[in-house]
Image (cartoon, helix red, strand yellow):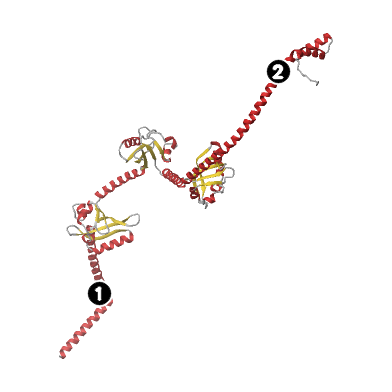
Amino acid sequence: MANVSLTFTVPEQELKLLEDYCHQTSRTKTDVIREYLGSIHQQSKEKLLSEIASLRQQLAEVKQEKADLEVLLETTVDHSSSIEAELQDEAEEARRESEEQFRAIAEATPVPVLISRVSDATILYANAASSVTFGFPIEELLGRPSLELYYDASERQKLLDILFRDGSVQNYQLRSKKADGTPFWVTVSLRSLRFNGESTILCAFNDITDRKQAEEALQQAKEQLEAVLNAVPGPISWMDAEGLYLGVNHHLAESLSLPPEAIIGKEVGFFNGNSPFAQFMHDFLASSETEASHELEVKGKDAVQYYLIAAQKYQQGSATVTVGIDITERKRAEEALRIAEENYRSIFENALEGIFQSTPDGYFIRVNPAMARIYGYSSAAEMITTVKQITTQVYVDPVGREEFKHRLEEQGEVKGWEYQVYRKDGSIIWVEENTRAVRDSSGTLLYYEGIIEDVTQRKQREEALQQQVKELRIEIDKTKQSQKVAAIVESDSFQNLKEKLKRMKKSREEREKQSLKKM
């Protein structure tokens, strides 16, 4: 009979009681335990045999179940292999149909479509539209790294980061390049895709070069417009139909000591209440007019300024632009001109000298009343209407007119020019003229402008004086001649000559007497 080793665990407290019992009875722990086991052995033997018989019965049942399961498993394996093969065939057919549908859709779409491998970016599929867009034949696109299509290759990693983070990429703008290296703008959308059993990326492109160029042109035009608006030395603003500012130029913002963004969205007149500008704009916005202009007087701390405000509605009247032009200097100049014109008009109308403007062709543009009186006309209007040709109707000597014009052409002005003219009644008078040629900024002759004075009396006095001088000179000449004769007569030479003449005369008389006697 084989030895059986039995191990059991005794709690520490019970072990302590066992040791105390052994000590009191002078027995060993082995003897006490063996005696205890012997007492319970007989009681459990029958129970154990019964349990063993039961276990043997259960073991036989388990073996039978095992045999049945092995048969069932073998049958199931054979059936599942058949089903798996059928499923694989169905899956392959579905994949083939799916790929055919995808290729049909991809080839039909006008959008460039590429499929590239995630690991090395190799292009595995390209549709006809991608060939046209990138300028490569399809066979050259296949197997080519998609990195070669990026103008900046680092963009691909940025796209992958977004794709792996968000699951897709939508309308990401970047610059791509064609086969010849020409850059162009596209939007690209990405999605992860299993293609031919590989991890790939489905890429759809849209060429937006024309749109980007239009946007850049629009941005450039906007910047140019802003530069122009900010360069204008006057306030410019645009507002909506309710009178809320949509924008202002720098000049207006600086005049209000505010940044432009602090004005946008505010109502017109927010800075100065019911100002003349605010009132003008409220009236204009409420009207059906599409454009208007108005001069405004703005009273500042030190001086009054004047602005010409021009307003124009646009976008079917939903917005309005206003331009302000500082006309303060112009208003001052106009006022100065008005005063100067009044002074000139007063001088022109009240001068004693004749003042005129005439054309080189020979007719009067303007004459003052004094001019008309000098020439014997009742009014300036009558003289301008009557005189059609200065050369023949005014100048007594027409040649003098041509000489006068020649001097003006050479010198630009003529001073102290005296000549005779006809009055309305045909009488002749003397006038003195001081005239200048008026030219425009390019040097073109516009008209003659001058002053005429009637010097007839002076000329008559001068002629009388000249006659007196002439007569006096004759008288003086006679006196001088008499004095010279007297001096000659009284001289010894003259007396000797006189004696000689007397002798000669006496001698001639004697010869004549003798001749008569001979006859």
Q: At which x and y percent is residue 194?
A: 55, 40
Question: Which residue is at the front of the view, 283 or 306?
Answer: 283
What numbered label is drawn on residue 198? none
353 relative position to 57: left or right: left
Question: Which residue is at the front of the view, 428 or 331?
Answer: 331
Q: Is residue 183 above or below residue 419?
A: above
Residue 488 falls in image quadrant? bottom left
Tag 2: residue type? Glu
What numbered label is drawn on residue 51? 2
Q: Is residue 48 above or below residue 277?
A: above
91 relative position to 8: left or right: left
163 relative position to 439: left or right: right
For the point 27% across and 75% down, which residue is it? Answer: 491
Which numbered disc flags the more N-terminal residue, 2 or 1? Answer: 2
Question: Which residue is at the front of the view, 227 or 168?
Answer: 168
For the point 73% across and 15% down, which residue is it? Answer: 46
Label 1 Cα crowd, 10 Å radius (few <14 / some 14-19 / many 20+): some
Q: At which x and y percent is residue 205?
A: 49, 44
Label 2 Cα crowd, 10 Å radius (few <14 / some 14-19 / many 20+): few
Q: At which x and y percent is residue 165?
A: 55, 36
Q: Is residue 41 visible?
A: yes
Q: Which residue is mark 1?
A: 489
